[in-house]
Image: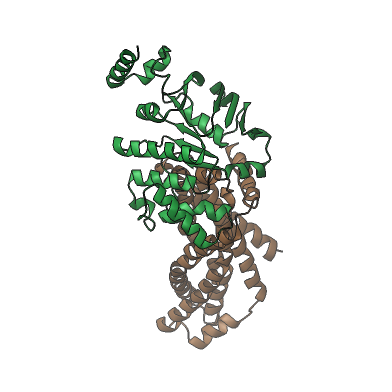
Protein backbone atom coordinates (compact mmCIF):
# COMPACT_ATOMS: atom_id res chain seq x y z
CA UNK A 1 0.00 0.00 0.00
CA UNK A 2 2.83 2.39 0.84
CA UNK A 3 4.36 1.81 -2.60
CA UNK A 4 1.04 2.54 -4.32
CA UNK A 5 0.58 5.65 -2.18
CA UNK A 6 4.07 6.86 -3.07
CA UNK A 7 3.56 6.23 -6.79
CA UNK A 8 0.31 8.23 -6.65
CA UNK A 9 1.96 11.01 -4.66
CA UNK A 10 4.84 11.11 -7.18
CA UNK A 11 2.48 11.66 -10.13
CA UNK A 12 0.50 14.28 -8.19
CA UNK A 13 3.81 16.02 -7.49
CA UNK A 14 4.55 16.09 -11.24
CA UNK A 15 1.14 17.68 -11.94
CA UNK A 16 1.52 20.21 -9.11
CA UNK A 17 5.00 21.11 -10.36
CA UNK A 18 3.50 22.78 -13.45
CA UNK A 19 0.81 24.78 -11.62
CA UNK A 20 1.14 28.44 -10.60
CA UNK A 21 4.47 29.11 -12.30
CA UNK A 22 7.15 31.18 -10.62
CA UNK A 23 7.98 34.54 -12.24
CA UNK A 24 10.17 33.99 -15.29
CA UNK A 25 12.84 36.46 -14.11
CA UNK A 26 13.30 34.35 -10.95
CA UNK A 27 12.88 30.99 -12.70
CA UNK A 28 15.57 31.90 -15.26
CA UNK A 29 18.15 32.41 -12.50
CA UNK A 30 17.17 29.16 -10.80
CA UNK A 31 17.50 27.21 -14.07
CA UNK A 32 20.95 28.69 -14.76
CA UNK A 33 22.06 27.89 -11.20
CA UNK A 34 20.80 24.31 -11.52
CA UNK A 35 22.48 23.87 -14.92
CA UNK A 36 25.71 24.89 -13.23
CA UNK A 37 25.18 22.65 -10.17
CA UNK A 38 23.73 19.59 -11.85
CA UNK A 39 25.12 19.46 -15.41
CA UNK A 40 28.32 21.54 -15.60
CA UNK A 41 29.30 20.33 -12.13
CA UNK A 42 29.00 16.72 -13.29
CA UNK A 43 31.08 17.05 -16.47
CA UNK A 44 34.36 16.28 -14.70
CA UNK A 45 33.23 12.97 -13.21
CA UNK A 46 31.40 11.96 -16.43
CA UNK A 47 34.52 12.71 -18.50
CA UNK A 48 36.82 10.85 -16.11
CA UNK A 49 34.66 7.73 -15.82
CA UNK A 50 33.79 7.61 -19.54
CA UNK A 51 37.40 7.87 -20.67
CA UNK A 52 38.67 5.09 -18.42
CA UNK A 53 35.68 2.78 -18.80
CA UNK A 54 36.04 3.18 -22.59
CA UNK A 55 39.65 2.05 -22.18
CA UNK A 56 38.66 -0.93 -20.01
CA UNK A 57 35.96 -2.08 -22.48
CA UNK A 58 38.51 -1.97 -25.29
CA UNK A 59 41.14 -3.93 -23.36
CA UNK A 60 38.67 -6.60 -22.24
CA UNK A 61 37.20 -6.96 -25.73
CA UNK A 62 40.66 -7.25 -27.29
CA UNK A 63 41.77 -9.83 -24.71
CA UNK A 64 38.70 -11.97 -25.37
CA UNK A 65 39.16 -12.08 -29.12
CA UNK A 66 41.81 -14.73 -29.66
CA UNK A 67 40.48 -16.30 -32.79
CA UNK A 68 42.58 -15.10 -35.80
CA UNK A 69 39.49 -15.39 -38.02
CA UNK A 70 37.78 -12.58 -36.13
CA UNK A 71 38.82 -9.24 -37.60
CA UNK A 72 40.71 -6.85 -35.32
CA UNK A 73 38.39 -3.93 -36.12
CA UNK A 74 35.74 -5.72 -34.04
CA UNK A 75 37.41 -4.24 -30.93
CA UNK A 76 36.53 -0.70 -32.03
CA UNK A 77 33.07 -1.82 -33.12
CA UNK A 78 32.30 -3.49 -29.74
CA UNK A 79 33.60 -0.48 -27.81
CA UNK A 80 31.45 1.93 -29.84
CA UNK A 81 28.31 -0.20 -29.45
CA UNK A 82 28.81 -0.76 -25.71
CA UNK A 83 29.42 2.90 -24.99
CA UNK A 84 26.71 4.41 -27.21
CA UNK A 85 23.98 1.88 -26.42
CA UNK A 86 24.50 1.20 -22.74
CA UNK A 87 27.41 2.66 -20.87
CA UNK A 88 26.96 6.35 -21.66
CA UNK A 89 23.18 6.64 -21.27
CA UNK A 90 22.39 4.01 -18.63
CA UNK A 91 25.39 3.42 -16.41
CA UNK A 92 26.39 7.07 -16.34
CA UNK A 93 22.82 7.83 -15.26
CA UNK A 94 23.11 5.37 -12.39
CA UNK A 95 26.34 7.04 -11.33
CA UNK A 96 24.54 10.38 -11.60
CA UNK A 97 21.73 9.02 -9.40
CA UNK A 98 24.40 8.86 -6.71
CA UNK A 99 25.94 12.25 -7.40
CA UNK A 100 23.13 14.50 -8.68
CA UNK A 101 20.29 12.53 -7.04
CA UNK A 102 21.80 12.63 -3.56
CA UNK A 103 22.54 16.33 -3.97
CA UNK A 104 18.92 17.06 -4.95
CA UNK A 105 17.42 14.93 -2.15
CA UNK A 106 19.68 16.31 0.54
CA UNK A 107 19.31 19.95 -0.51
CA UNK A 108 15.50 19.78 -0.74
CA UNK A 109 15.32 17.57 2.37
CA UNK A 110 17.37 20.08 4.36
CA UNK A 111 15.02 22.83 3.20
CA UNK A 112 12.11 20.71 4.49
CA UNK A 113 13.77 20.09 7.87
CA UNK A 114 14.68 23.75 8.37
CA UNK A 115 11.14 24.93 7.43
CA UNK A 116 12.39 26.72 4.29
CA UNK A 117 9.74 24.92 2.21
CA UNK A 118 7.07 25.99 4.73
CA UNK A 119 8.39 29.54 4.36
CA UNK A 120 7.89 29.34 0.58
CA UNK A 121 4.37 27.95 0.99
CA UNK A 122 3.39 30.59 3.56
CA UNK A 123 4.53 33.27 1.11
CA UNK A 124 2.11 31.82 -1.44
CA UNK A 125 4.81 30.34 -3.66
CA UNK A 126 4.26 26.98 -5.35
CA UNK A 127 7.28 25.34 -3.73
CA UNK A 128 7.26 22.36 -6.11
CA UNK A 129 7.34 24.66 -9.12
CA UNK A 130 10.05 26.76 -7.48
CA UNK A 131 12.25 23.84 -6.40
CA UNK A 132 11.66 20.93 -8.79
CA UNK A 133 10.82 22.46 -12.18
CA UNK A 134 14.16 24.34 -12.57
CA UNK A 135 16.03 21.11 -11.85
CA UNK A 136 13.94 19.23 -14.40
CA UNK A 137 14.54 21.90 -17.06
CA UNK A 138 18.25 22.10 -16.19
CA UNK A 139 18.63 18.36 -16.63
CA UNK A 140 17.26 18.61 -20.20
CA UNK A 141 20.87 19.56 -20.95
CA UNK A 142 22.02 16.26 -19.45
CA UNK A 143 22.13 14.55 -22.91
CA UNK A 144 24.90 17.00 -23.87
CA UNK A 145 26.93 15.69 -20.96
CA UNK A 146 26.20 12.16 -22.13
CA UNK A 147 27.30 13.07 -25.69
CA UNK A 148 30.62 14.22 -24.22
CA UNK A 149 30.74 10.93 -22.28
CA UNK A 150 30.21 8.95 -25.51
CA UNK A 151 32.97 10.85 -27.30
CA UNK A 152 35.43 10.48 -24.41
CA UNK A 153 34.54 6.81 -23.94
CA UNK A 154 35.40 6.04 -27.55
CA UNK A 155 38.50 8.24 -27.27
CA UNK A 156 39.56 6.37 -24.11
CA UNK A 157 39.12 3.08 -25.99
CA UNK A 158 41.26 4.41 -28.81
CA UNK A 159 44.00 5.52 -26.41
CA UNK A 160 44.00 2.12 -24.68
CA UNK A 161 44.02 0.33 -28.02
CA UNK A 162 46.86 2.28 -29.57
CA UNK A 163 49.05 2.79 -26.51
CA UNK A 164 48.39 -0.73 -25.16
CA UNK A 165 49.18 -2.29 -28.56
CA UNK A 166 45.91 -4.26 -28.82
CA UNK A 167 45.04 -3.17 -32.37
CA UNK A 168 46.19 -0.52 -34.76
CA UNK A 169 44.62 2.93 -34.89
CA UNK A 170 43.34 2.17 -38.43
CA UNK A 171 41.56 -1.01 -37.23
CA UNK A 172 40.00 0.83 -34.29
CA UNK A 173 38.76 3.70 -36.49
CA UNK A 174 37.43 1.19 -39.03
CA UNK A 175 35.62 -0.57 -36.18
CA UNK A 176 33.88 2.54 -34.93
CA UNK A 177 32.80 3.39 -38.50
CA UNK A 178 31.51 -0.12 -39.27
CA UNK A 179 27.75 -0.62 -39.38
CA UNK A 180 27.08 2.84 -37.96
CA UNK A 181 23.36 3.30 -37.35
CA UNK A 182 22.08 6.78 -36.62
CA UNK A 183 19.03 5.29 -34.90
CA UNK A 184 21.27 3.96 -32.14
CA UNK A 185 22.24 7.52 -31.30
CA UNK A 186 18.56 8.60 -31.36
CA UNK A 187 17.64 5.62 -29.14
CA UNK A 188 20.41 6.53 -26.76
CA UNK A 189 19.34 10.18 -26.50
CA UNK A 190 15.67 9.29 -26.04
CA UNK A 191 16.73 7.09 -23.11
CA UNK A 192 18.89 9.88 -21.76
CA UNK A 193 16.01 12.39 -21.82
CA UNK A 194 13.79 9.94 -19.92
CA UNK A 195 16.56 9.25 -17.39
CA UNK A 196 17.17 13.00 -16.98
CA UNK A 197 13.52 13.44 -16.01
CA UNK A 198 13.81 10.54 -13.54
CA UNK A 199 17.07 11.96 -12.14
CA UNK A 200 15.36 15.28 -11.42
CA UNK A 201 12.01 14.12 -10.11
CA UNK A 202 12.53 10.97 -8.00
CA UNK A 203 15.25 12.52 -5.78
CA UNK A 204 13.12 15.69 -5.51
CA UNK A 205 10.14 13.56 -4.41
CA UNK A 206 12.18 11.87 -1.68
CA UNK A 207 13.57 15.20 -0.45
CA UNK A 208 10.30 17.11 -0.64
CA UNK A 209 8.14 14.59 1.21
CA UNK A 210 10.69 13.49 3.81
CA UNK A 211 9.80 13.75 7.49
CA UNK A 212 12.10 14.02 10.49
CA UNK A 213 15.51 15.56 11.07
CA UNK A 214 19.09 15.47 9.82
CA UNK A 215 19.35 11.66 10.14
CA UNK A 216 16.29 11.22 7.93
CA UNK A 217 17.85 13.48 5.27
CA UNK A 218 20.67 10.93 4.98
CA UNK A 219 18.21 8.04 4.86
CA UNK A 220 16.11 9.84 2.23
CA UNK A 221 19.24 10.32 0.06
CA UNK A 222 19.99 6.60 0.21
CA UNK A 223 16.38 5.63 -0.54
CA UNK A 224 16.29 8.10 -3.40
CA UNK A 225 19.47 6.59 -4.91
CA UNK A 226 18.04 3.07 -4.68
CA UNK A 227 14.69 3.98 -6.28
CA UNK A 228 16.21 6.19 -8.97
CA UNK A 229 18.54 3.32 -9.96
CA UNK A 230 15.71 0.76 -9.93
CA UNK A 231 13.46 2.95 -12.09
CA UNK A 232 16.32 3.70 -14.53
CA UNK A 233 17.10 -0.02 -14.91
CA UNK A 234 13.42 -0.91 -15.42
CA UNK A 235 12.81 1.90 -17.91
CA UNK A 236 16.03 0.94 -19.70
CA UNK A 237 14.64 -2.53 -20.25
CA UNK A 238 11.21 -1.28 -21.35
CA UNK A 239 12.60 1.39 -23.72
CA UNK A 240 15.12 -1.01 -25.22
CA UNK A 241 12.44 -3.61 -25.84
CA UNK A 242 10.14 -0.98 -27.33
CA UNK A 243 12.72 0.63 -29.61
CA UNK A 244 15.16 -2.12 -30.50
CA UNK A 245 13.22 -5.31 -29.78
CA UNK A 246 11.58 -7.51 -32.42
CA UNK B 1 -8.49 41.07 11.90
CA UNK B 2 -8.44 37.29 12.00
CA UNK B 3 -11.53 35.50 13.27
CA UNK B 4 -11.44 31.82 14.26
CA UNK B 5 -14.67 29.91 14.87
CA UNK B 6 -14.98 26.45 16.39
CA UNK B 7 -11.74 25.09 14.93
CA UNK B 8 -11.25 21.31 15.06
CA UNK B 9 -8.15 19.47 13.89
CA UNK B 10 -7.19 15.80 14.30
CA UNK B 11 -4.19 13.65 13.40
CA UNK B 12 -4.81 9.91 12.88
CA UNK B 13 -8.04 10.09 14.87
CA UNK B 14 -6.50 12.00 17.79
CA UNK B 15 -8.16 15.39 18.23
CA UNK B 16 -5.54 18.10 18.73
CA UNK B 17 -7.74 21.21 18.46
CA UNK B 18 -11.16 20.75 20.06
CA UNK B 19 -13.21 23.71 18.92
CA UNK B 20 -11.21 26.92 19.34
CA UNK B 21 -12.92 30.27 18.76
CA UNK B 22 -11.14 33.60 19.12
CA UNK B 23 -10.34 36.88 17.39
CA UNK B 24 -6.93 38.39 16.66
CA UNK B 25 -7.17 42.14 16.35
CA UNK B 26 -5.52 44.51 13.90
CA UNK B 27 -2.65 46.64 15.21
CA UNK B 28 -2.23 44.47 18.28
CA UNK B 29 0.30 41.84 19.32
CA UNK B 30 -1.81 38.73 19.89
CA UNK B 31 -0.09 35.94 21.80
CA UNK B 32 -0.99 32.26 21.80
CA UNK B 33 0.44 30.62 24.91
CA UNK B 34 0.23 27.19 26.49
CA UNK B 35 2.27 24.18 27.52
CA UNK B 36 4.15 22.04 25.01
CA UNK B 37 1.62 19.73 23.36
CA UNK B 38 -1.31 22.07 23.98
CA UNK B 39 -1.84 22.54 20.23
CA UNK B 40 -0.20 25.97 19.74
CA UNK B 41 1.89 25.04 16.71
CA UNK B 42 -0.97 23.10 15.09
CA UNK B 43 -3.24 26.10 15.67
CA UNK B 44 -0.68 28.46 14.11
CA UNK B 45 -0.18 26.16 11.10
CA UNK B 46 -3.97 26.00 10.63
CA UNK B 47 -4.05 29.81 10.69
CA UNK B 48 -1.32 29.88 8.05
CA UNK B 49 -3.14 27.37 5.86
CA UNK B 50 -0.31 24.84 6.16
CA UNK B 51 -2.73 22.34 7.79
CA UNK B 52 -6.29 21.60 6.68
CA UNK B 53 -8.86 21.31 9.45
CA UNK B 54 -12.02 19.19 9.75
CA UNK B 55 -14.44 21.71 11.19
CA UNK B 56 -14.73 25.42 11.86
CA UNK B 57 -13.62 28.49 9.96
CA UNK B 58 -10.81 31.02 9.81
CA UNK B 59 -11.50 34.38 8.21
CA UNK B 60 -9.00 37.07 7.29
CA UNK B 61 -10.77 40.44 7.28
CA UNK B 62 -14.01 38.72 6.35
CA UNK B 63 -12.53 36.33 3.75
CA UNK B 64 -13.14 32.74 4.89
CA UNK B 65 -9.94 30.85 4.07
CA UNK B 66 -11.52 27.46 3.28
CA UNK B 67 -13.88 29.07 0.75
CA UNK B 68 -11.09 30.69 -1.26
CA UNK B 69 -9.81 29.21 -4.52
CA UNK B 70 -6.18 28.03 -4.65
CA UNK B 71 -5.19 31.24 -6.45
CA UNK B 72 -7.03 33.39 -3.91
CA UNK B 73 -5.31 31.49 -1.09
CA UNK B 74 -1.91 32.13 -2.67
CA UNK B 75 -2.77 35.83 -3.10
CA UNK B 76 -3.81 36.01 0.55
CA UNK B 77 -0.57 34.32 1.58
CA UNK B 78 1.35 37.06 -0.24
CA UNK B 79 -0.12 39.39 2.42
CA UNK B 80 1.22 37.22 5.24
CA UNK B 81 4.64 37.57 6.84
CA UNK B 82 5.96 34.69 8.90
CA UNK B 83 8.87 34.42 11.32
CA UNK B 84 9.66 30.75 11.86
CA UNK B 85 11.07 29.31 15.06
CA UNK B 86 14.34 28.42 13.33
CA UNK B 87 14.18 31.59 11.18
CA UNK B 88 13.94 29.45 7.96
CA UNK B 89 16.26 31.74 6.02
CA UNK B 90 17.23 30.46 2.57
CA UNK B 91 20.79 29.31 3.19
CA UNK B 92 21.85 29.61 -0.46
CA UNK B 93 21.13 33.37 -0.41
CA UNK B 94 22.81 36.29 1.33
CA UNK B 95 20.91 38.22 3.99
CA UNK B 96 20.01 40.97 1.50
CA UNK B 97 18.83 38.39 -1.06
CA UNK B 98 16.69 36.70 1.61
CA UNK B 99 15.00 39.99 2.41
CA UNK B 100 14.62 40.90 -1.27
CA UNK B 101 13.06 37.52 -2.10
CA UNK B 102 9.36 38.41 -1.46
CA UNK B 103 9.80 41.61 -3.50
CA UNK B 104 11.23 39.65 -6.43
CA UNK B 105 8.38 37.17 -6.26
CA UNK B 106 5.41 39.46 -5.79
CA UNK B 107 6.23 42.93 -7.06
CA UNK B 108 7.35 44.46 -10.33
CA UNK B 109 9.74 46.89 -8.67
CA UNK B 110 13.00 47.80 -10.37
CA UNK B 111 16.29 46.55 -8.93
CA UNK B 112 17.09 49.94 -7.40
CA UNK B 113 13.62 50.21 -5.82
CA UNK B 114 14.01 46.75 -4.32
CA UNK B 115 17.49 47.59 -3.08
CA UNK B 116 16.22 50.78 -1.43
CA UNK B 117 13.41 48.87 0.27
CA UNK B 118 15.82 46.16 1.50
CA UNK B 119 18.19 48.84 2.84
CA UNK B 120 15.28 50.52 4.63
CA UNK B 121 13.95 47.33 6.19
CA UNK B 122 17.37 46.05 7.25
CA UNK B 123 18.05 49.44 8.84
CA UNK B 124 14.66 49.19 10.59
CA UNK B 125 15.78 45.94 12.26
CA UNK B 126 19.22 47.42 13.04
CA UNK B 127 21.14 45.36 10.51
CA UNK B 128 22.57 48.02 8.20
CA UNK B 129 25.92 46.32 7.62
CA UNK B 130 24.94 42.67 7.19
CA UNK B 131 23.74 42.72 3.57
CA UNK B 132 26.37 40.40 2.13
CA UNK B 133 26.64 37.93 4.98
CA UNK B 134 25.30 34.42 4.54
CA UNK B 135 22.69 33.26 7.11
CA UNK B 136 25.20 30.74 8.49
CA UNK B 137 27.54 33.65 9.35
CA UNK B 138 24.86 35.45 11.38
CA UNK B 139 24.12 34.93 15.09
CA UNK B 140 20.73 33.59 16.28
CA UNK B 141 19.51 37.10 17.13
CA UNK B 142 20.64 38.46 13.75
CA UNK B 143 18.91 35.58 11.95
CA UNK B 144 15.66 36.36 13.79
CA UNK B 145 15.96 40.03 12.82
CA UNK B 146 16.57 39.06 9.18
CA UNK B 147 13.51 36.79 9.35
CA UNK B 148 11.46 39.75 10.68
CA UNK B 149 12.86 41.98 7.93
CA UNK B 150 11.91 39.39 5.29
CA UNK B 151 8.45 39.05 6.83
CA UNK B 152 7.70 42.79 6.73
CA UNK B 153 9.48 43.81 3.52
CA UNK B 154 6.34 43.43 1.41
CA UNK B 155 4.13 45.37 3.87
CA UNK B 156 2.11 42.39 5.09
CA UNK B 157 -1.34 42.75 6.63
CA UNK B 158 -0.74 39.78 8.92
CA UNK B 159 2.45 38.82 10.76
CA UNK B 160 2.87 35.40 12.38
CA UNK B 161 5.77 34.52 14.65
CA UNK B 162 6.46 31.02 15.94
CA UNK B 163 8.51 31.21 19.15
CA UNK B 164 10.44 34.30 18.02
CA UNK B 165 12.55 34.27 21.21
CA UNK B 166 13.50 30.63 21.39
CA UNK B 167 17.23 30.10 21.75
CA UNK B 168 17.96 33.78 22.36
CA UNK B 169 19.57 35.41 25.40
CA UNK B 170 17.20 37.56 27.53
CA UNK B 171 18.58 40.86 26.22
CA UNK B 172 18.24 39.88 22.55
CA UNK B 173 14.79 38.42 23.29
CA UNK B 174 13.64 41.82 24.58
CA UNK B 175 15.06 43.52 21.47
CA UNK B 176 13.07 41.10 19.26
CA UNK B 177 9.87 41.59 21.35
CA UNK B 178 10.14 45.37 21.17
CA UNK B 179 10.86 45.23 17.45
CA UNK B 180 7.77 43.12 16.78
CA UNK B 181 5.58 45.43 18.86
CA UNK B 182 6.94 48.58 17.24
CA UNK B 183 6.41 47.16 13.75
CA UNK B 184 2.87 46.06 14.67
CA UNK B 185 2.00 49.56 15.90
CA UNK B 186 3.78 51.34 13.06
CA UNK B 187 2.23 49.39 10.18
CA UNK B 188 -1.05 48.40 11.93
CA UNK B 189 -0.44 44.71 11.25
CA UNK B 190 -2.46 41.88 12.79
CA UNK B 191 0.35 40.10 14.63
CA UNK B 192 -0.05 36.60 16.05
CA UNK B 193 2.81 35.23 18.17
CA UNK B 194 3.15 31.68 19.37
CA UNK B 195 5.20 31.79 22.56
CA UNK B 196 5.91 30.31 25.92
CA UNK B 197 8.29 33.05 26.96
CA UNK B 198 6.55 34.58 29.99
CA UNK B 199 8.57 37.75 29.66
CA UNK B 200 7.03 38.29 26.20
CA UNK B 201 3.60 37.60 27.66
CA UNK B 202 4.05 40.36 30.25
CA UNK B 203 5.77 42.83 27.92
CA UNK B 204 3.87 42.67 24.63
CA UNK B 205 0.77 40.53 25.22
CA UNK B 206 -1.91 43.03 24.20
CA UNK B 207 -4.16 40.04 23.64
CA UNK B 208 -3.42 36.59 25.06
CA UNK B 209 -5.08 33.30 24.18
CA UNK B 210 -4.18 30.45 26.54
CA UNK B 211 -4.53 26.93 25.13
CA UNK B 212 -4.73 23.75 27.18
CA UNK B 213 -5.25 20.28 25.73
CA UNK B 214 -6.53 21.72 22.45
CA UNK B 215 -9.07 24.02 24.07
CA UNK B 216 -9.05 27.75 24.73
CA UNK B 217 -8.74 27.81 28.51
CA UNK B 218 -8.48 31.58 28.95
CA UNK B 219 -8.38 34.83 27.00
CA UNK B 220 -7.24 38.24 28.15
CA UNK B 221 -4.30 40.66 28.05
CA UNK B 222 -1.02 41.30 29.88
CA UNK B 223 -3.00 43.59 32.19
CA UNK B 224 -5.71 41.10 33.12
CA UNK B 225 -3.39 38.09 33.38
CA UNK B 226 -2.06 39.42 36.72
CA UNK B 227 -5.55 39.55 38.19
CA UNK B 228 -7.00 36.35 36.85
CA UNK B 229 -7.93 33.67 39.34
CA UNK B 230 -8.16 31.00 36.64
CA UNK B 231 -6.04 28.26 38.23
CA UNK B 232 -5.02 26.68 34.93
CA UNK B 233 -3.54 29.99 33.77
CA UNK B 234 -1.89 30.92 37.07
CA UNK B 235 -0.36 27.43 37.39
CA UNK B 236 1.27 27.84 33.98
CA UNK B 237 2.14 31.54 33.86
CA UNK B 238 3.32 31.82 37.46
CA UNK B 239 5.05 28.46 37.68
CA UNK B 240 8.43 30.09 38.43
CA UNK B 241 9.10 31.60 41.86
CA UNK B 242 10.19 34.86 40.28
CA UNK B 243 6.88 35.35 38.49
CA UNK B 244 4.97 34.30 41.63
CA UNK B 245 6.75 37.12 43.52
CA UNK B 246 6.15 39.60 40.68
CA UNK B 247 2.45 38.77 40.70
CA UNK B 248 2.22 39.04 44.46
CA UNK B 249 3.87 42.46 44.39
CA UNK B 250 1.62 43.61 41.55
CA UNK B 251 -1.53 42.50 43.36
CA UNK B 252 -0.41 44.14 46.62
CA UNK B 253 0.38 47.42 44.83
CA UNK B 254 -2.96 47.38 43.00
CA UNK B 255 -5.24 46.40 45.90
x, y (%) of residue B105? 56, 53
- Give the residue at x 36% y 26%: B198
In the image, residue A77 above or below residue A26: below
x, y (%) of residue B180? 43, 38
Q: Identify the hue of chain B.
A: green
In the image, residue A164 above or below residue A209: below
Q: Is residue B22 left or right of residue B248?
A: right
Front-most of B153 and A37?
A: B153
- Give the residue at x 54% y 82%: A73
- How many numbered marks have been drawn onto this rendered protein structure? 0
Q: Is residue B77 left or right of residue B174?
A: right
In the image, residue B116 above or below residue A68: above
Return the residue found at the far bottom: A170
x, y (%) of residue A187? 65, 68
- Give the residue at x 52% y 38%: B189
Quadrant assignment for the C terminus of chain A: bottom right
- Give the residue at x 47% y 57%: B116
Front-most of B35 and B241?
A: B241
Q: Identify the hue of chain A.
A: brown
Amino acid sequence: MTYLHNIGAYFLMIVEMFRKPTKWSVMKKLILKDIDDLVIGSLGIIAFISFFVGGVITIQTALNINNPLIPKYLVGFATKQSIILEFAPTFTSIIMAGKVGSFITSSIGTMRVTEQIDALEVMGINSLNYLVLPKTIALLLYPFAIAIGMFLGILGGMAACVFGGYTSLEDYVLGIQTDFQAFHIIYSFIKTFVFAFILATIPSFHGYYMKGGALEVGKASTTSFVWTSVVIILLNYILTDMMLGQ
Amino acid sequence: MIEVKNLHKSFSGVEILKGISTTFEKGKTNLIIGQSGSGKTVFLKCLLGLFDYEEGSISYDGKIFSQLTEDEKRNLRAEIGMVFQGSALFDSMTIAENVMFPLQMFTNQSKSEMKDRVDFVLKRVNLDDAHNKMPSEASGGMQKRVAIARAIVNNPKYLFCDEPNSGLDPKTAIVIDNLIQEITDEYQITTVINSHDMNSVMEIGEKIVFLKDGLKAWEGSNKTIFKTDNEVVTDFVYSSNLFKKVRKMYLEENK
